[in-house]
Image: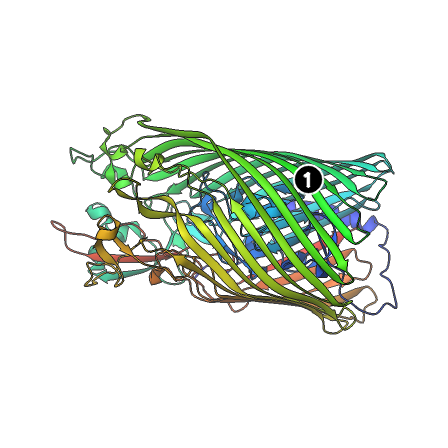
Amino acid sequence: MPAKHRIVLCPMALAVAGAMLSMAAQAQEAPQPAQGAAPALEQVVVTANKRVERLENVPQSISVISEELLQRNNVRDLDDIIELSPSLSKTQSDNPANTGLNMRGIGTQSIGIGVESDVAVIVDDIPIGMQVQAFRDLTDVSRIEILKGPQSTLFGKSAIAGAINIVTKPISGPVRTRASVLMSDDREWRLSASIGGDVSEKFGFRIAASQNDFAGNVHNLTTGKWTNGARGKTFLGKLTWRPLDNVSVDFSPRYNHTLTDCCVVVINGVTGTNTQNGLLNNIPAMPIGLALDGISPNKDNINIRNDTFTGQESTTRGAGLRVNWELPNGGTLTSITSMDRYHANDSRDQDFTDLPVMLYYPVTGTGLPAGINSGSSQHGRFDVISRTQELRYTSSDSGALRYVAGVWYGKNELARYFKRGEYGLIATSPTEFYGDTYNINKAVFGQASWEFIPRTTLTAGLRYNEQESGYRFNGSGNPSALPFGSPFRPTHVFSSLGNNDEHVTGKLSLQRQFTPNLMGYVSGSTGYKGHAYDITSSLNALTASQQPVKPETAESFEVGMKGSFLGNRLTVAATAFSSKFEDYQQNSGSYIPDTLIYQTRLNSLPGVETKGVELDVNALVTGNLLVNAAFAYTDASITEFRNAQCYQVPGSPNGGFNESCILRNPEFGNQNTQDVSGGRMPFAPRRKATVNFRYDVRMPSRSFDGFVTGTIAHASDMVTNLDQNPINYVQPTTYLHAGFGLRDRTGKYTFSVRVNNLLDKRYMSNRSVQLGNFNAFAPNPLAQVTTTTWSPQRNAFRNIAVKLDMNF
């Protein structure tokens, strides 16, 4: 069990907090809220159709996470959003760079620079070039729109499964300042501040900055430090110039630096026979007792021994330029230009111990120990440059016909260097490569809504997309066969440039406004994701000859209703959906065409699908009690995958593999395969729900009122691999969070306390990774050892956070 937590007061945090309090004390009182109005829910607007609309008027499934809900739940990044949105889940990896988003159970499982994401992340109309960039601080956010199902028509080819539209706070009104300080009893602190407003009729500005540090919840006995956390700094700027009454120019620079030392592998179990005789890679100098010195492998273990940093350090720099020209007819012409540069270095302790394993690992050919006084590790880097240009016209909101039309240009350049192990040492699984890829996208899009009879609207949209893409690769071929100590030699050099693809996507919906407050709709949409490239260490001449992997496509249908009841004290949105994906891009085994050679490579599965129902409810139960609830039932499955990899089952009479495995299957190159058609998609819980509430308490004091908050988040079990191996099932999780606080009646101060994982439940929310090979065989004493592991998530242990928000 971890040591008792304590609040660590950072001197910087105290100094900043003191300064903020001093400033706040001198500030003028905020205006009082309107009195006498009947209590009702706040009006929610979205920009899912490239124009500002009321949420209940948009004929598609959208969940909106408001600023108030973000603040109430102490949201920091997308990991926190996933808990609040039942339609979202995450592909968890032991490398931060290989973490991906899933919408309705569909997401990219084969993550790399040559495979685009299935879920687009857009910040202020600017898409993120590589999905890992999205896992950073959410600073100065006004709302987050979760757009479910294919969004390719308006948001492009990387939104085939859905999109997350993040809207930051606008520049409006007089200059105001906000600040927040958070500290927890498990070594986390956060600081954020913003200032902005209109300084004249012509100029306005907004500046926001944040810094956070969570040391982590895993203790590294080797270094004496905490790990499995994250820390970062973010800066956002907005400058507005209004040279004419109908023209505005917004310039938005941004910067983020994030250090994530996450995804470390923590042992929580050792089973087998004669486990005390276990030897790492059968080397007598590395017994299991030495490798696990001071570590007790149980469900509460948080201790590791690593001598190499595991995680990623990244920097993003970018800027956006937006020009709006309001035309006399009520329409708006908008130009959005952006450029982003992303650089990241990643590394991992490959042997999961602090032992100098390469002192003993044998050299290929001689069998002599390598004699290198270090452990085995891997490291690499990413470089991403993204440029976009969008020009669109949005018609007036008045009239029976409303439309948006535009052109789009985007170019992404991505590069990856990766090295693992040492040449000539098979035990380190050596590999090394340089790879880069690019894609250039040009598109024309349009969407129109026509109220062709009163209260009945037809919406139709089309997008024509043209893409050019390609890649280059320099790899080391068979590094295990290279002489020990060899320098990098690019013996495998491949490229495929100038690959062109054209595709048209569309959407069609019919909505009926049954009453002023009740709307129903049916809709259909298609999605598209472009060519993919297998830029990994396993690339060889045969698989390279099959590049690029063909595009992925989707067809989706949904029916839903949205209603506002009881004087807008209750809103309900319900959706039923069905989506089918063809040529799903995923690593799988297949014959190389026109050969009898069967290899595992990035390929296209015939199909996957997802279907289910979703429900969003917001209720102002009383004038003091607000409840936000969301539920999703998602059945995401594999339509056809007859040649999936088998998984090992110790002691199985079927050659040591699972019962359904066909050994040496003649249909698939005499490889061991299984048919997982009808199986579950990874990281796709069937049931997921979240309930949030806030209860306001009128205090006898004239200055402050109180409030109580709570969150219940539940997710059912899920698989974590397409092979359906039950050892990698993730158990159901139910988290209970609770809080309380005080808010002064002028709106200047809010003090809150939040307890996460109130019941202190342990959940293994990621797949098990084997912690090294501790099996031993002759001439050493025999031992059969199986290890199980976990990587504790942020709320794996109960933690308490206090936060002070100031607004003046």
Residue 287 in view (yes/no): yes
Residue identified by numbered label 1: 406
Question: Which residue lies at the image location 68% right of the left edge and 54% below the top edge?
Answer: 459
- Please tell me in which quadrant of the rendered image residue 719 appears: bottom left
Location of the N terminus by quadrant is bottom left
Q: Is residue 94 left or right of residue 170?
A: left
Name the amino acid, label 1.
Gly
Height in image: 469 above or below 673?
above
Residue 437 in view (yes/no): no
Height in image: 434 above or below 150?
above
Residue 187, percent across and down? 54, 52
Give the class, few, some or many, for how many residues have Cα within 10 Å of label 1's Cα (few <14, many ≥20).
Answer: some
Q: Nearer the viewer, residue 491 or 516?
A: 516
Residue 422, percent across and down? 29, 34
Q: Secondary structure at mark 1?
A: strand
Residue 697, percent across and down? 75, 71
Question: Which residue lies at the image location 34% right of the left edge and 54% below the top edge?
Answer: 294
Height in image: 2 above or below 304?
below
Residue 528, percent across and down? 53, 46
- Please tell me in which quadrant of the rendered image residue 520 appears: bottom right
Q: In the current view of this chain or complex, which residue is farthest to the left?
A: 779
